[in-house]
Every structure is written in C-alpha cells, then in structure tokens.
Amino acid sequence: MKLDIVHDLQSFYRKLVHAYSRPGQLANLRKEAAIVREDGNEECPTPILLIALTLFDQEVTFKVLSEKAGMITKTINQLTYAKQGEIEEADYILVLQDAETGALNKAIEKAKSGTLKNPHSSATIIIEVTEITAEPALELKGPGIKTVEYVQVELAENWIESRQSKNKEFPLGVDLMFVDQQDQLLSVPRTTQISENRVMV
C-alpha cells in the first residue's frame, strides 16, 4: 500500500480526534483518501477503509452491512487482522449505502451499548451516506459545541429516534460516524443532542 502508515494515518487520526471532540464540524479526508485510492481497493469505500486502517487491529471485531459484505469483510480482515463478529457483539458496525432498507435502525437497535462499569465497551456505527453539508436540517448541541452546529445528512432512513432511544440511559449508548462520497466525516458521539430543525433558512 502506498499509504505512509506513520505519517498519513497519524494525520487522519488527528482529524478523527478533532471531529469527535467537535461534533458537527466536518473533517476533510480528501488527501488521505486519494492516497488510499491509488492502491485500488475499490470494493471498500475509501473513508471507511481509512477508519478501519486507523482504528482496527487483531483485538477488534466488526460487522459489515452491505450487499458486498463478504468482499469488504475479507479486505478489512486482510489489512487489519480485525475479525468479523455478530452485530450484537461487534465493536464497529459498518452500514454501507447499498445495505438493505432499515439496516441502520437495525444496527442501532442491536449494537452493544456498554455497561455502567465500562461504557466505552459499546459499539461505534459507521455509516456511508451520499452527502453531508452544513445546511440547517439537524441541530446539534452538547459537549464540544460552543452554542449550536447545523448539519444535513443525505440519508433516506429516519435514524434520529432510534439513536435517542438507544442513548437514553447515558453513559450507555452508541457513537455514530458518517462518511460521504465527497470524503467528509461527521462524528456524532452519544453525548451530542440532536433535533430536527423545523425552521429551514
């Protein structure tokens, strides 16, 4: 792989950390994504592969929800040594755009939400979408947000209610990451409050 494991993945990791600590602010992954694309792993969406290369190792389990789940699972396993797991036990759940209808809500419902003793043993759900913009469709508040952030996630499935139900017993819950076809990343940790912005401007 032409990706510089030390330099490029460290750069990407810093962007991941910034996105997680500043919910609502989009991380631009185009530089790192372009390098990954040179290696020709076309079966796995580039931003998702970047996340896997950065966060997965032999101790991690993951589940892919996609029509190409077999190929993507094999690629990630070969590159990271992470193992496929059942959706209820997976550390990371990858929901691709070609997943069956209702896949995201199913992932949120079935994902492990941690324990009171170890809430960080919960799952992170990574979702591929068409586009993420700063349009005022969703209103985000909470830690890491000075006042309010606005985003729009191009996703047909209504996932907000499922997420709120899953995360109602804080610190239990799941964290979400959205990646789009423009190589942007949006992190929505469980601490972030989301509401639909009824007043569109």
Image: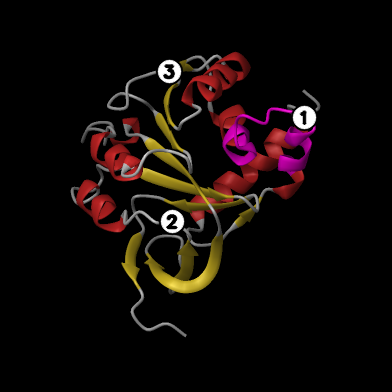
Q: Nearer the viewer, residue 50 or 170?
A: 50
Q: Which residue is mark 2?
A: 155
Residue type at tag 3: Gln
* Relative horizontal placement of residue 108, taking residue 29 as reference (left or right): left
User: For the residue labelled by badge 3, is the local secondary structure a helix, a strand or a loop?
Assistant: strand
Q: Quadrant of residue 122?
A: top left
Up-down: is 14 above or below 81? Answer: below
Neighbour tally class for label 2: few under 14, some 14-19, many 20 plus, Cα within 10 Å: some
Residue 84, disc: 3
Residue type at tag 2: Leu
**Which mark sits nearer the N-terminus, 2 or 1?**
1
User: For the residue labelled by badge 2, is the local secondary structure a helix, a strand or a loop?
Assistant: loop
Q: Residue at x 48, y 59 (%)?
A: 154
* Relative horizontal placement of residue 101, taking residue 48 as reference (left or right): left
Neighbour tally class for label 1: few under 14, some 14-19, many 20 plus, Cα within 10 Å: some
Up-down: is 68 above or below 21? Answer: above
Q: Quadrant of residue 1?
A: top right
Residue type at tag 1: Leu
Q: Is residue 146 visible?
A: no
* Gap in angstroms between the C-alphas marked 2 and 1: 30 Å
* Gap in angstroms between the C-alphas marked 3 and 1: 24 Å
Q: Residue at x 56, y 30 (%)?
A: 52
Q: Residue at x 37, y 63 (%)?
A: 142
| Relative image position of residue 63 (x, y in whole percent) | 41, 26
